[in-house]
Image (tube, coloured by chain):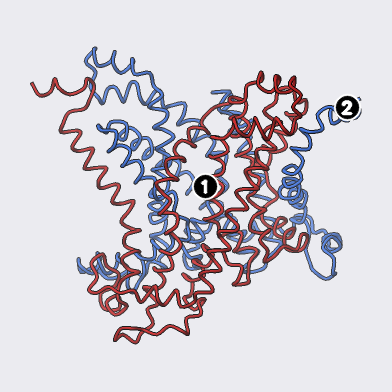
Chain colours: A blue, B red
Amino acid sequence: MVGRSFIREIRKNSALFALLLPAFVIVLVNNYIPMLGSFIAFKDIKYTKPGFIQNLIASPWVGFKNFEFLFKSNAAFIITRNTILYNVLFMVLGTVLAVLLAILLNEVTGKRKAKLYQNLTFIPYFISYVAVAYLVYAFLSFNYGLANHGILKVFGIAEIDWYSSKQYWPLILTIIVMWKWTGYNAVVYLAGITGINSEYFEAAQIDGASKMQQIRYITLPFLAPFIIIMNLLALGRIFYSDFGLFFQTTMNIGALYDTTLVIDTYVYNSLAVTGELGMASAAGFYQAVVGLVLVLTSNFVVKKLDRDSALF
Amino acid sequence: MAATLRPPGAISRKAEFVIHIFFVLYCLVCILPIALVLIISFTDEGSIMRNGYSFFPESLNLNAYRFVLSDTAAIFRSYSVSGIVTLSGTLFGVLLTAAYAYPLSRNDFAYRKFFAFFIAFTMLFNGGLVPWYILYVKGLVIKNTYLALILPQVVNGFYVIILRTFMQHNIPKEVVESAKLDGAGEFRIFFQIALRLAMPGLATVALFLSLSYWNDWYNALLFIDQKKMFPLQYLMYKVNASIDVLNTSSFVSNTADTVRPSESARMAMAILGIGPIIMIYPFLQRYLVKGLTVGAVKG
């Protein structure tokens, strides 16, 4: 019987179970109870009673009403579109730039210079999005920003009210993400490049291959599995966004929502700003379920390509 | 021939020069935004009003910092909240992560597959923000407490898996078995042998944890509304929205300007927030690059 052998195992390895236990309990509370709690997406949560559990039980079931509201509103389309398009854009451009940077870093002659360049390009990774919001503001502030005062004015172009002009934000957000992550991502690819056996390059040089040919026929083919797997894993996360990016740097300004609102920020706004618990939990549930399907699919594909790189 | 002096396979001098130019420019792109904020924080408010933000301001002074720091209490509190959260969160986080990862790394532990799945599943699926928020606020009732800032990040599935893999590769089975034969109990093996052998892995997890605790503002956004519990990053966020979050009534300008230095003060606040990270940056970066490679070890 499973039960009995489990108990025997606990007796035998009680110390190992004791080590597991604290983190196990925390994960249970932190992750699993909210998973069970996702049923509230099918309820109309009201706080009328004093107790926490009583309220959850007492709130009436409403079936798919919350989802109906969500998908009848324009919001569902906008946030899904924005989330997916931004993620695709960041994946494609991010990979190209990170691989390019890694290849260039690998070609830098002089160890100390290479180290210095790597260290400096890594800095943006350490800056929190709250701080990034300040950096962005220093450039885009209407009254004092460098973009309006240092650049547009000099060329005699009319100043732009960046924080109410939604059309510029896809570009602005892309620049921010590339600025913050390229140095970090390049490290991963650089590790891949330095792992290539140098005999391949030596043989190619003897055969008279140019640097470009070596990159084209040795470096890139070797990096291909890395690139594919990193992107497939990112594909599994395509329904999730970096909350800090979309919340902080846009300062959560409503006039920009058309091009900046993503599922994560929508859920937060519905919960904390407008207090629409039903919409918030429905959107959260939608994200979690579609996200799970996507991550399982991409993991399945990764596993087919390279067993070791799969998540599970 | 000069070319023969160069190592075989090296790129031409011209290409080398182009690459160096590229990196100088790219490094400037990485640093200049931070430099701009630093310069603005020292810029005289009057010259901001006249010329906007600039890399080359007319006049510099310390008014912005005197203004921000006139609310000594708030700044000091925020530093200490962030410090306490970062230190205790990292310490508990590393211990909990290691204690969970170690049994998973042991081939003779029968239920390791189940417990590995239990933790890995949290990376794939979550209940969403709302049930989690309700649990914290109405269930555990930990609004405005340190617990609300520490608990969310303290056990991270990704770090558990990284550390398990690291332990599998770096704690030889023979060492554990011979320690057992010598009469050491499991706890002793964990604390005295496993933790020591896993040190580089622990350091990596500690580094990532401390960075994410120090830079955290999201949990404060959700669970903190009392000013005395604001972590530094959250105070920065609040100041960006409105400088009036700071109680600066005791500030007296020491220049002819009578305007409040609110534009430069914003940026001074940003520098106070970024400063500690930049200062320990050389140390951090060396270990993080190593850490990324630790994470790359496949299991």
Q: Quadrant of residue B43?
A: bottom left
Structural crowding at the residue carrying mark 2, measured as other residues with C-alpha within 10 Å and reported as few (<14), some (14–19) or many (≥20)? few
Output the chain of dot 2.
A
Residue A277 x, y percent position in the rendering: 70, 63
Q: Nearer the viewer, residue B236 or A223?
A: B236
Report the disc number at residue A84.
1
Indicate the secondary structure of the residue bearing disc 2: helix
- Up-down relation of residue B266 to residue A260 (above or below): below
Q: Quadrant of the N terminus of chain A?
A: top right
Kind of residue at badge 2 = Arg
Structural crowding at the residue carrying mark 1, measured as other residues with C-alpha within 10 Å and reported as few (<14), some (14–19) or many (≥20)? some
Q: Is residue B82 left or right of residue A177?
A: right
Kind of residue at badge 1 = Ile
Q: Nearer the viewer, mark 1 or mark 2?
A: 2
Q: Quadrant of the C terminus of chain A?
A: top right
Q: Is residue B45 left or right of residue A302?
A: left
Q: Quadrant of residue B205?
A: top right
- Up-down relation of residue B194 to residue B240 (above or below): above
Residue B96 x, y percent position in the rendering: 68, 43
- Up-down relation of residue B129 to residue A139 (above or below): above
- The residue at which mark 2 appears reads as A8
Q: Quadrant of residue B254?
A: bottom left
Q: Nearer the viewer, residue A55 or A103?
A: A103
The residues bearing labels 1 and 2 have C-alpha atoms spaced at a distance of 49 Å
Is disc 1 in the same subunit as disc 2? yes
The residue sitting at 47% across, 26% down in the picture is A225
Residue A118 x, y percent position in the rendering: 35, 40
The residue sitting at 41% across, 49% down in the picture is B281
Residue A63 x, y percent position in the rendering: 79, 55
Output the chain of dot 1.
A
Indicate the secondary structure of the residue bearing disc 1: helix
- Between discs 1 and 2, the one toward the N terminus: 2
